[in-house]
Image (cartoon, rainbow, N blue to C red):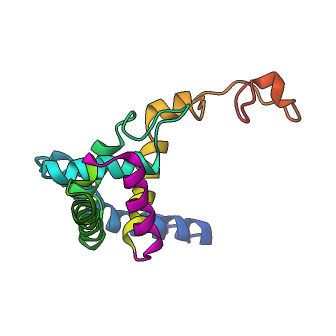
Amino acid sequence: MNPPAPAPYTRREALVRAAALAGLSLTPAWIDRVLAAAAGPVVALPPARAAVLAAAAERILPRTDTPGATDVGVPAFLARLLEGYVSPADRDTVLVGLDALEAAARAAHGRGFAEVAPAAQDAFVRAAAEAGGRFFPLLREYTLLGYFTSERVGREVLHYDPVPGRWDPCVPLAEVGDRLWTR
């Protein structure tokens, strides 16, 4: 007796299998990269660069009535991001930009970027933003990513509720504490 012939694939099943195969072929490379970066030793930025990075992040998101970038650990996030998770070209762009901020502060004030007054730091960061190029957009993007994915900002600023209650449409904001998505 012969075994029954397999049923022909449906188009949906063929697409599901093709997507799974594509995912399996791409996944090992990403997993290897993430695990290697996470398991590898953390090579810290030199202290001078780390100070410039922290000061620049704080100038992008300073402390106001909400926590600043330094308050929520953005400098450590940025250092880790630059050490193993961004492309070498983007990392080099950010590091060269940080060195340029440091050099500009030393030329203008005789002190490092992290040591000058916040108003002077703002002027240097503004000049870097107006100069064009990829440095400031990358630094701003990475700083915002670190800030808005931090737990403290999620709880205190965004008021994120991971398991929200019931959904009531058309509720006055005053009834929900002026928060758009939690009740």
The structure residue drawn at horizontal position 29% and vertical position 71%, both measured from the top left corner, is 93
The structure residue drawn at horizontal position 59% and vertical position 35%, both measured from the top left corner, is 158
The structure residue drawn at horizontal position 40% and vertical position 68%, both measured from the top left corner, is 128
**Is 154 above or below relative to 146?**
above
Residue 178: percent from left, percent from top = 75, 29
Query: Which image quadrant is residue 85 in?
Result: bottom left
- Whether residue 149 appears in magenta in the rendering, the answer is no
Closer to us: 8 or 154: 154
Residue 9: percent from left, percent from top = 56, 70
Q: In this view, does 125 lie to the left or right of 155?
A: left
Seen from this angle, which residue lies furthest front? 109
Closer to us: 34 or 49: 49
The structure residue drawn at horizontal position 42% and vertical position 50%, both measured from the top left corner, is 119
Give, as a single range, the part of the protein colored magenta: 115-133
- Whether residue 121 appears in magenta in the rendering, the answer is yes
- Image quarter where the C terminus lies is top right
Residue 65: percent from left, percent from top = 56, 31
